[in-house]
Image (cartoon, rainbow, N blue to C red):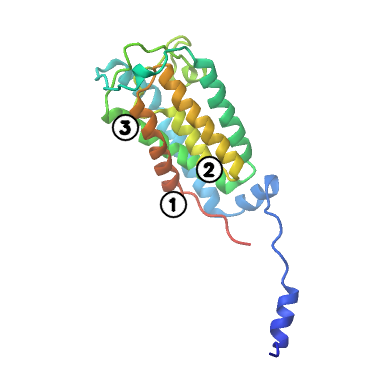
Amino acid sequence: MRVSPSISAASHTRTPAGPPVVGSEAWTHALAQPAFRWSWLLLLVLLFGGLVPVVPGFFHFIQQRPGAVAFDPLLGLLPRRDVAWPIFALMYGGVVVAVGWLTRYPHLFLRGMWGYLLLLVLRMAAIWLVPLVPPLDIVAMPDPFLALVFHTEANEAITKDLFFSGHTSTVVLLALAVRGRWLRRGLAIVATLIGVLVLVQRVHYTCDVLAAPLFAWLAYWAAQYLAPNEPLA
């Protein structure tokens, strides 16, 4: 069968796609797109102009209101220990690694930030709608970093932010946001360990941990409609 010269020539002049642009060059290309800039502007306005100012008052409010003790037979099967520092190490270590990776890819980073904003909104709504008090044998876990955000004393823990687990859902969201099999698997393992440890610490119920991945997925899925896609080369 005779091959058309035009088709043959085209097949030989086609060049393979180059490696993806990352880092500062990727940010230069991304910031040249109006949709990317407007999405970042809207995100920052909503985050720092809308959400951040109301977060301290919200958590002070839920800390004062009454709530119910959830029925959770699994907690009685787990040991009760103070594992706050392993939780912090896994949580913030995972955040540093994932965010460090995401900053090389502006569009993925933007979608991850939108996902985190939506996750915060979903979590505040869930906490509002499901008033719970912590397990009776809770081991308080004050977080010095969150104390700065909530304007509380460093040794004062917010204990009624229960449904759903913020530590677990944040790391699950990061696992969805990054790319690469091993990085995703590593973050998924970290999220699983955190989910178990917050139960050992008695700062959450099992339902809080099991619901966290579902809300993280929902937030990341919805974020795709707010963050512009990277244009094809």
Give how far across and how far down residue 26 sits, in percent. 66, 49
Give how far across and how far down residue 70 sits, in percent. 27, 22
Secondary structure of the residue carrying numbered label 3: helix
Distance in Å between CA atoms under marks 1 and 3: 22 Å
Q: Mark 2 points at which residue?
A: 177
Q: In which quarter of the image is residue 15?
A: bottom right
Give how far across and how far down residue 53 sits, in percent. 41, 27
Q: Are marks 1 and 3 in contact (CB under 8 Å)?
A: no
Q: Name the residue under label 3.
A: 126
- Residue 162 lies, with reference to residue 14, above or below; the image says above
The residue under the point 59% across, 36% down is 98
- Residue 27 lies, with reference to residue 130, above or below; the image says below
Secondary structure of the residue carrying numbered label 1: loop
**Which quadrant of the rendered structure holds the C terminus?**
bottom right
**Which quadrant of the rendered structure holds the N terminus?**
bottom right
Q: In this view, does 11 lie to the left or right of 216?
A: right
Q: Can residue 102 be seen in this view?
A: no
Q: In which quarter of the image is residue 218?
A: top left
Under mark 3, the amino acid is Ala
Q: Can residue 25 be seen in this view?
A: yes
Q: Mark 1 points at which residue?
A: 225
